[in-house]
Image: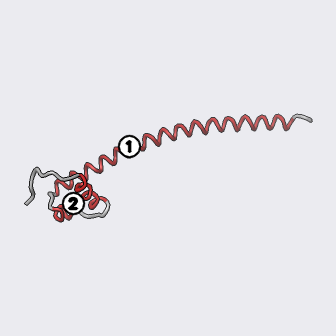
Amino acid sequence: MFMSGQRYTPEFKEEAIKQVLERGYTTADVAERLGVSQHSIYKWVKAAKSSSNQLSDEELIEAKKEILRLRGQLKRTEEERDILKKAARYFASQPE
C-alpha cells in the first residue's frame, strides 16, 4: 500500500513531525492516518530532533559566551566597588 520513493513536501513532513512531537500521537498512528510508512515518520522525527539539538548546542555556546562576558563585567564592578570602599574609609578617617 505504501509507495516507496515517493517525495513529500517539507510542509507535509513538518505536520507529521508536529503530530508526533507536539500532539503526542505515536508514529504508527500518524503513519496510518497519513498513509506514510512508519519508518519514514520515524526518520523525519529523528532528523527534526537532531536539528533542534544542534540549535540548542549553538544556543548553549552563545549562553556560555554571555556568562563569561558577564563574569568579567562583574569582576570589574566588584574591583571598582572595593576601590570606592577604600576611598570612602580613607576620607572618613581624615580630619576636616
* Viewer-nearest residue: 33 or 12: 12
> Three-letter amino acid code at disc 1?
Asp
What residue is shown with label 1? 57
- Tell me the element at label 1: helix
Direction from residue 19 to residue 70 in the image, left or right: right
Answer with the quarter of the image where residue 22 lies: bottom left
Answer with the quarter of the image where residue 13 lies: bottom left
Q: Is residue 71 above or below residue 40?
A: above
Callout 1: few (<14), some (14-19), or many (20+) C-alpha neighbours within 10 Å?
Answer: few
The total number of labels drawn is 2
Q: Locate the N terminus by quadrant.
A: bottom left
Answer with the quarter of the image where residue 37 lies: bottom left
- Tell me the element at label 2: helix
Q: Locate the C terminus by quadrant.
A: top right
Direction from residue 56 to residue 50 in the image, left or right: left
Where is residue 15 drawn, in percent x and y? 26, 58
What residue is shown with label 2? 27
Where is residue 79 drawn, in percent x and y? 67, 35
Q: Is residue 25 above or below residue 96?
A: below
Q: Earlier in the sequence, mark 1 or mark 2?
A: 2
* Viewer-nearest residue: 5 or 82: 5
3D distance between C-alphas at marks 1 and 2: 26 Å
Where is residue 20 drawn, in percent x and y? 27, 60
Where is residue 12 drawn, in percent x and y? 22, 56
Q: Residue at x 66, y 38 (%)?
A: 78
Callout 2: few (<14), some (14-19), or many (20+) C-alpha neighbours within 10 Å?
Answer: many
> Three-letter amino acid code at disc 2?
Thr
